[in-house]
Image (spheres, rainbow, N blue to C red):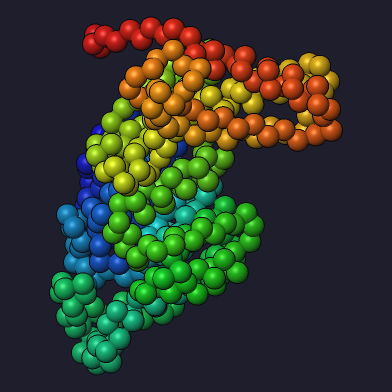
Amino acid sequence: MPIERFQFTGEGGHQLAAALDMPEREPRGYALFAHCFTCGKDVLAAKRISAALAASGIAVLRFDFTGLGSSEGDFANSTFSSNVADLVRAADHLRETRKAPAILIGHSLGGAAILAAAAQIPDARAVVTIAAPSDPAHVTGLFKDRIEDIRKAGDIEVSLAGRPFRIKREFLDDIAEHGLMAHVANLHKALLIMHSPTDDTVGIENATRIFGAAKHPKSFVSLADADHLLTQRADAAYVAGMIAAWAGRYIDPAAPEQAADLGQAPRRVVVRETRNGKFQQTVTIGPHRMLADEPLAVGGEDSGPGPYDFLLAGLGACTSMTMRLYADRKSLPLDRVTVTLQHDKIHAEDCAECETKAGMLDRIDLVIATEGALDADQRKRLMEIAEKCPVHRTLTSEIRIVTRAAD
């Protein structure tokens, strides 16, 4: 995915370094990402989540807070309030140069900052917190043995994640003044809370408090076995996938060039490498975007279905749709169809009805369950109709695939 790098002016007049992760096509929406305390826009979680969201069609702006990464200014002079103000400035920059962010995402203390800033970003319709504390002052636990020294001296250097940072008394005073739960209670935006139950940096009880204070619509997703910084690529991919799916209803409908594709049947399918992992691909079908990948066992990240998963899904969906069309046309009492599929390789000699008698063959097991007050003849006819679905016919007929180099 292409990344645009630039600077914008923060609340304190400093130039803040930013990166805008863009989809290959016109974005279906924009998001603003706030990184964790003392991290930066290029921390693994921020980069991976932003790249995966861009692959799903959502552009993401991430930037270094004052005094961090490539941004100007002195970290010692920054506060929680200044971070909130910089987030509002970042949203303003997006609004002026592209389009205002519809989604606000914050990781750890960035999640608390996003909640505090949300009311000042009226265009945003959805907010996502990842491992966020319910009280910004929670971050002082990282240097709790130096708090008294900071209050006495007014300015002390502390070690955070093995790096030196200067913390001022003003930072402690500012962060203590923020009643985050009031912001949560008056959010008036959809909220998705994501947190690991085994997070040993910001405990799961923080998510419980945020969820309890928020009003609907609100959702909670447990990040089982993930660590606080989402250092595993698969965890970041999972988070991005959940955000993209959940936020779909809160971003604008398809861009004009995508909408023009809506009436076409069949529609063009575009598959492109993301270069995020060994096998990950974006699959674009009209206004729809998905990820394709391979399982962990074969070197993938399992961030999306595999090629054969998509094949089976197409056959299963077509089978169910064909049965539904027939049942409705014949007024059959069919309540629901469930199709379960599995692909495997078998020895040709084990297939009595197959023409090929040597080597290995592909086999798809397709099990159909029908619900409803159907009699035996109706169920039998529906099973016959199932094999007449267009995808089934395509897979069992002669297929010619024409491959050529792009112009």
> Is residue 170 among what the camera can see?
no
Image label count: 0
289, 339: nearer the viewer? 339
> Is residue 385 among what the camera can see?
yes
198, 175: nearer the viewer? 198
Q: Give the quadrant of residue 369.
A: top right
* 49 w.r.t. 254: above or below: below
Compared across the picture, whether 378 is left or right of 151 comes to right
Q: Position of residue 235 (x, y in %)?
A: 36, 54
Q: Position of residue 385 (x, y in %)?
A: 68, 17
Q: Position of residue 270 (x, y in %)?
A: 37, 22
Q: Give the quadrant of residue 291.
A: top left
Compared across the picture, whether 208 is left or right of 290 comes to right
Q: Position of residue 19 (x, y in %)?
A: 26, 45
Residue drawn at (84%, 33%) of the image: 373
Residue drawn at (21%, 61%) of the image: 68
Compared across the picture, whether 247 is left or right of 154 comes to right
* 212 w.r.t. 236: above or below: below
Residue drawn at (18%, 58%) of the image: 69
Compared across the picture, whether 381 is left or right of 174 comes to right
Where does the C terminus fall, quadrant-wise?
A: top left
Where does the N terminus fall, quadrant-wise?
A: top left
157, 231: nearer the viewer? 231
Q: Give the quadrant of residue 378.
A: top right
Residue drawn at (38%, 17%) of the image: 357
* 314 w.r.t. 357: above or below: below
